[in-house]
Amino acid sequence: MNILEPGFSPKQAKIRFMDADYLVISPGTFVPCAITGKPILIEDLKYWSVDRQEAYVDVNAALQAHLKNDSGD
């Protein structure tokens, strides 16, 4: 469904991130980026951490999370 279509109501999904895929625990249209807080449409979800169970909006956010985790923060 397109966000510009009438009747679109965004709902946060609950997802379990796995190595090469993810499992939708609770259906929804988006998940928030763990770094930026921006919503990521489920069909656009490409970056996540299995260990931290976090989603990232893009490769830069994924790198920030990795660097933050390595620094012990």
Image: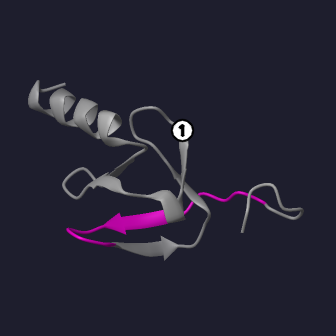
Image quadrant occupied by the N terminus: bottom right
Q: Residue at x 61, y 66 (%)?
A: 28
Side of 43 where 21 appears, left or right: left
Q: Main secondary structure of the magenta part?
A: loop
| Residue type marked 1 | Lys
Q: Is residue 11 magenta?
A: yes
Q: Is residue 7 left or right of residue 36?
A: right
As drawn, 40 above or below 13: above
Residue at (87% x, 65% y) in the render: 7
Extent of the magenta region: 9-21
Q: Residue at x 62, y 63 (%)?
A: 29
Give percent across and percent down for residue 66: 18, 36
Q: Residues within 10 Å of mark 1 (few under 14, many from 20)?
A: few
In this image, 69 relative to 25: left or right? Answer: left
| Residue 31 inside the magenta-drawn segment | no
Which quadrant of the view contains residue 33? top left
- The foreground one among 18 and 6 is 6
Q: Which residue is mark 1?
A: 38
Report the label total.
Answer: 1
